[in-house]
Amino acid sequence: MKPWEYIIRSISRNEIDNVIRINRECLPENYSRFFFEEIFRNFQRYFLVAEFNGKIVGYAMARVETIFHLFKLQKKLHLISIAVLPSFRRMGIASSLLKKLEEEAVSADIFSIFLEVRVSNYGALSLYRKMGFKMVQVLKKYYRDGEDAYLMEKILSRGMGPPGFEPGFLG
Ligand SMILES: CC(C)(COP(=O)(O)OP(=O)(O)OC[C@H]1O[C@@H](n2cnc3c(N)ncnc32)[C@H](O)[C@@H]1OP(=O)(O)O)[C@@H](O)C(=O)NCCC(=O)NCCS
């Protein structure tokens, strides 16, 4: 393996602790072990890790949600959490995690991927914009500390909306 190479793959049960550690180190939004295990049980396909020289250095965790949108039920992938350990950032790991999630979602015929991000999280915002996400709404006081979030979405399947439907706009 070259020094900058990493592997993106689905998580194994015994790696949930590693992900919990990364989550606590990198983000103020922390979840219970039960929550991580629940995502693992139900959405393992969308619970990904980045492995670098045998070490878990990042993860992305998403779940499928069925939403009544534009007069019909649609399956959307909700990115719940993504983080990369500080010393492994700016190597394309988060982009690769998102790309893999997107591939999985496309093959499962999922309409879009959406997420919430703090308005002050410029690094993450820049990553999401680069990956094709569009800002669709400001969620006022979304976080416990009162900070607003941007709701961002990336439409995956074309031609599913009614005439005049603008990809990137969430009604
Ligand atoms: C946001 C985060 C996941 C990005 O991970 P990463 O592996 O470094 O991202 P990538 O290397 O794939 O970055 C791809 C592009 O996104 C943009 N980007 C990523 N981090 C950035 C930063 N800190 N500042 C500005 N742009 C950034 C850049 O355009 C970058 O491309 P470049 O390196 O060629 O300039 C990581 O910084 C992190 O874990 N942050 C703490 C947790 C967090 O905020 N998660 C998101 C919650 S919504």
Image: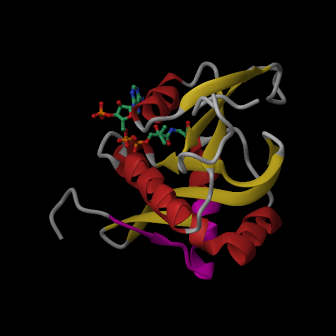
- Outermost left residue: 2
Left/right of residue 14 with respect to residue 2 in the rendered view: right
x and y percent of residue 161 in the render? 66, 42
x and y percent of residue 64 in the render? 71, 60
- Outermost front residue: 163
Who is closer to the viewer here, 158 or 86?
158
Specify the quadrant that holds the N terminus: bottom left
x and y percent of residue 118 in the render? 65, 26
- Residue beneath the point at 51% across and 73% down: 10
Whether 166 is drawn above or below 40: the answer is above
- Residue beneath the point at 79% across and 29% down: 143
Whether 43 is drawn above or below 101: the answer is below
Q: Which residues are magenta?
A: 7-20
Left/right of residue 160 with respect to residue 139 in the rendered view: left
Magenta residue check for 13: yes
Label tally: 0
Who is closer to the viewer here, 22 or 166?
166
Who is closer to the viewer here, 110 or 127?
110
x and y percent of residue 32 in the render? 80, 59
* Residue 45 in view (yes/no): yes
* Residue 58 in view (yes/no): no
Q: In terms of image quarters, where does ligand 1 lie?
A: top left
